Image: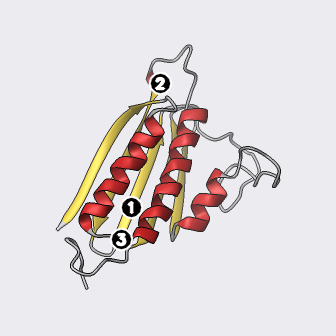
Amino acid sequence: MSIWWSLHLRREAASVPLARRLLLGTMETAGVDPDISYDLSVALTEACANAVEHGGDRDTDEVSRDYRVTAYLDGEKCRIEVADSGPGFPVGGATLRGHSAAPAPGHAESGRGMCLIEQLADHVHVRNRPGRGAVVSFDKVLKWREGALLDVS
């Protein structure tokens, strides 16, 4: 058995905990190990926060006022994708493992999201679509509680 869901959310701060709670509830119901669930929920929170903050111009562009979150739990892996409709990452900037931002200094209040996602997930892929948005996808091998609904072991 596998589970997948997709949300179309407004680029508002209140949408971030909604996506996180849905992911955590899905994983708890499926029987995913709580530590794995926590790691993925933090990574999802960072990706959603980036989409809310950088995914477009709220004041002038109706299309970029939303973003999409999709999660797939299938077998031994969970894949999460967050896509926005904003300007995408700046073209030609410095990259960090394919990402267009360098890590923020330790005292900064923001700017560490992509680095954190890379630390919490097993694989991260960023697709830049200049003028049409960015897509951040990441996955992690799942561990299961005994008797879990989707346990493939």
Inter-mark Cα distance, 2 to 3: 30 Å
Q: Which residue is mark 1?
A: 79
Contact check, label 2 and label 3, Cβ < 8 Å: no
Instruction: Identify which residue, 99 or 117, lies in the foreground.
Output: 117
Instruction: Identify which residue, 13 or 104, lies in the foreground.
Output: 13
The residue at 39%/61% (across/down) is: 79
State the residue lying farthest toward the left.
1
Residue 98 visible somewhere in the drawing = no
Q: Earlier in the sequence, mark 1 or mark 2?
A: 2
Q: Which residue is mark 3?
A: 77
Q: Amino acid at mark 1?
A: Arg
Q: Secondary structure at mark 1?
A: strand
Q: Amino acid at mark 2?
A: Arg
| Residue 94, numbered circle | none
Q: Which residue is mark 2?
A: 65
Q: Position of residue 53 (x, y in %)?
A: 60, 34
Q: Position of residue 68 (x, y in %)?
A: 39, 39
- 117 to 61, vertically: above or below: below
On the rendered structure, is 114 left or right of 153?
Answer: right
On the rendered structure, is 105 left or right of 4?
Answer: right
